[in-house]
Amino acid sequence: MKKILTLTALGVVLACSDANASGFYLKEQSAAAQGNAYAGATAGAEDISYSYFNPAAISYHSGTNVEFGGTWISPTSVAKNANNNLGNHDDYVGNIVHAAASPQAYFSHQINDKITAGISLNTPFGMITKYGDDWAGRNHGTLSKIISATFTPMVAYKFNDQLSFGAGIPVQYIKATLRNSVAPGQGIEDKSTVQGKTIDVGYQLGAIYEPLKGTRFGAGYRSKIKHKIKGDIEFDSLLAQMNQDVSARLTTPATFNLGIYHQINDDWAVMAEYSRVYWSSFDKLIINGKKTGQLSYTAEKWKDTDFFALGISKQLDSQWKLRLGVAYEKGAVGEEYRTPRIPDSNRTWYSAGLEYKYNEKLTFNVGYTHIAADSAKVNLRGDHRGDERRGSLNAEYSNKIHIVAGSITYNF
């Protein structure tokens, strides 16, 4: 039983592709910050959406504020020259990722001169990859889908005009679907689908220090969240007797951010950002079945990733502001462990944004990003633990992405 179920490749139940950030992390949580390629996201505090990166940001906004936003992510990841040791070869597979929307919502309320409370709702992880059922890498995956939602109550405390601290409690929901082929013996092939979901809790911390008016330094940290996914596996036909409940442990990574924001004069501002995503927590994934115990072991061997960004903004007049930014980000996994579910690679961001302040209460933001990603290769030899019966796989990917974001902010 265990040998048959190992073939399902359950070890990647939550590892679906995301070409716009390392691994399957969605950085796109603020239309305003996106205009600067997220440079200064930890220090800028330009609207309450910056609280995703640093909860201390809400201390810079008086009264009661509400913001609604959304991001349209349109990726392209073209797979070609796929082949395995079984003699299967695909000259052209086509685009295997799909466009998706990522909504965000924020609320803050100034309780007094020192304390501000807030709430955020975000989708920090997710994407979809889909191949044809007969492609050369079908034993490694044909469909990967992840949906997430994170609800974060937070509070910020302003010690004085120079120093603010913030903290939050992210409550994270994850739902995943995985599909692939299963070939337990000569002439026998079936297809399996795994679905699972969970809700778990982490923490968030942040601080902003403003030694001079208009010059801010920020630091933010989001903890890893240890998830235990519970769900089931279903086979299409031949192996239906093996249907059962399953569970898997997945740790979504911690993130650490450092930012600088400097207002040069009334018109110009510059900013920079460094962030690290601790993907090394995703070293392996073990799947257990209710009937049979351990079903699958997948060696992931992901690495921590770094993100560097520079940005500039220009106040065009009393209502309009222009934002520009560029960033570079490392991929989370090398070609030896890269799977067709995650054709992850290094990428460069080019961003622009516009802010329109209709009046003192109502503000609109739009942002656009083009991400040029390095080509990626999958070189699975078939000798990693858990891959013995999945076989080898070689494939090439070219990746790029377009992102459009918008938000509306109202101050009561």
Image (tube, grey):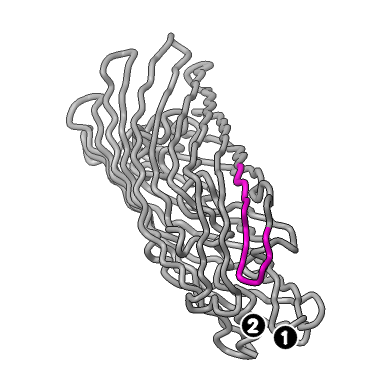
Q: For residue 5, which numbered disc appears in the image? A: 2
Task: Give yes or no for residue 85 being in the magenta stretch.
Answer: yes
Q: Nearer the viewer, mark 1 or mark 2?
A: 2
What residue lies at 23% left-to-right and 41% top-to-bottom? 159
What residue lies at 54% left-to-right and 26% top-to-bottom? 366
Q: Quadrant of residue 234?
A: bottom right
Q: Is residue 166 visible?
A: no
Which residue lies under the disc numbered 1? Answer: 242
Helix, strand or loop for disc 1: helix
Q: For residue 106, which numbered disc appears in the image? A: none
Residue type highlighted by circle 2:
Leu
Helix, strand or loop for disc 2: helix
- Point out residue 157 in the picture as x, y percentages from the top left corner: 30, 44
User: How many marks are shown on the rendered structure?
Assistant: 2
Q: Which region is colored magenta?
A: 76-89
Seen from the viewer's position, the closer of residues 310 and 43 is 310
